[in-house]
Structures are given as structure tokens and as C-alpha cells.
Image (tube, rainbow, N blue to C red):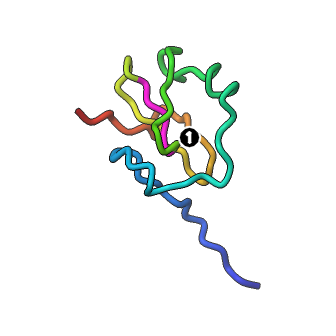
Amino acid sequence: MASMSSKPRQREFESGDSSLYKPAMPMNRELIEILACPKCKGPLELTPNESAFVCRACRLVYAVVDEIPNFIVEEAQPLEG
């Protein structure tokens, strides 16, 4: 039996360079519009390359790993800049 890596693929979300990652299937815009930050319940912005969601109020970045958003507050990264 072949072993599969259990480590999820990380995607670059800070550069905003859409050439780094092209999703297999674009995220559903209707669903994106109703998503809210799990910490403050405020609006989220999807990065141009669809690799992360950003909450400007909390200054947190929620990564999208293997096309699945990770909205665990403790695993979010601080927004740079």
C-alpha cells in the first residue's frame, strides 16, 4: 500500500501573485459572500489568488489548504503590513 503524505499543501498567500496558484475549481462566490470571520463575525476578503481569507478588523489571515478554508482562529496568521 502506498503511503500518502499527511502534511497538507501550504499555499503562498502573502504575495498576492495569482500566478503562484491556480485553483482547480474557483470558489463559489455566493458562499464567499456569506462567510464571516469566526473571531469577530466581520466580513472576510478572499485574496486574489484564492489562497487565503483576510479579516481586516482582526488583522488575521485564514489559509486555504487543499481548497478548504481553515477557519480555526488559533491557526490563523497575523496580517502583515
Q: Residue at x 43, y 37 (%)?
A: 76
Up-down relation of residue 16 to residue 71 (above or below): below
Q: Is the magenta region chiefly helix, strand or loop? A: strand
The 10 Å Cα crowd at callout 1, few under 14, some 14 to 19, many 20 or more, is some
As helix, strand or loop, the secondary structure at mark 1 comes to loop
Q: Circle 1 is placed at which residue position? A: 70
Provide the residue span drawn in magenta: 51-55
Q: Residue at x 41, y 35 (%)?
A: 61
Please state which amino acid type lies under the numbered disc 1. Asn
Does 24 sit left or right of 7 as displayed?
A: right
Does 66 sit left or right of 37 as displayed?
A: right
Tell whether position 54 is magenta: yes
Up-down relation of residue 22 to residue 60 (above or below): below
Q: Which quadrant is the N terminus positioned in?
A: bottom right
Name the spot of residue 57 as percent of width and height, x first. Answer: 38, 17
Tell whether position 56 is magenta: no
Q: Residue furthest right?
A: 1
Q: Residue at x 65, y 55 (%)?
A: 24
Q: Residue at x 54, y 45 (%)?
A: 64
Q: Residue furthest left?
A: 81
Up-down relation of residue 3 to residue 40 (above or below): below
Name the spot of residue 18 as percent of width and height, x first. Answer: 44, 49
